[in-house]
Amino acid sequence: MTFHDLPDNFRDLPLDDSILRADAVDLFVSYADRDLGCLALIALDEQHRVTAPIVITEMGAGQPDGIRHALRTIGAQLELRGLVAAIGRHGSPLFTDNDRACHQAIVDVCRELGVDLLGTYIALGSGVRELPDHLRMAS
């Protein structure tokens, strides 16, 4: 699926569905930002509806420390209730050790800030993939 599959009223819908979240990431993360490397954060309200997409561009290969810093800075400025995060990058569609380390950094900061993290995605030129949430899968 792609952002072309989003319903017209998707901003009124909660992003509780993983397919809808992936399509929203596909919409908000441009191909140029994926190629240059970015961190995309989709801020959500308490009902998990989109309040604001935030894309930090030209990050290159995202690093966990840079992602922690960016997320803490944004978290201090905005009242985040929920979040969908995406790491834009080029290269293989397979998850890398760096992808997993960046995902863990996002999980840690969201816990620290008390923000509901609905999912973390990798946005590539070839599509959008959700990183597995092992805690949710184990329960």
Image (cartoon, rainbow, N blue to C red):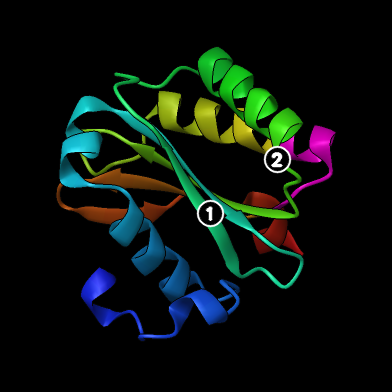
Residue 119 in percent (x, y) is at: 56, 55
Label 2: which secondary element? loop
Query: Type of residue at label 1?
Result: Ala
* Residue at which label 1 appears: 52
Name which quarter of the figure residue 15 lies in: bottom right
Taking 122 as reference, is 10 left or right? right
Judge whether residue 132 can be spotted in this image: no
Q: Residue furthest top?
A: 65
> Residue at position x 66%, y 68% from top?
48
Q: Name the one closer to the observer, 139 or 76.
A: 76
Name which quarter of the figure residue 28 lies in: bottom left
Tally of numbered discs = 2
* Residue at which label 2 appears: 78
Residue 116 in percent (x, y) is at: 74, 54
- Above or below — where is 46 with respect to 20? above
- Above or below — where is 128 with respect to 24? above
Query: Type of residue at label 2?
Result: Leu
Q: Name the one closer to the observer, 97 or 24.
A: 24
Q: Any magenta on residue 10?
A: no
Do residues under tags 1 and 2 come within 8 Å of each other at their CB atoms? yes
Residue 63 in percent (x, y) is at: 46, 17
Taking 91 as reference, is 75 left or right? right
Which region shows up in magenta?
109-116
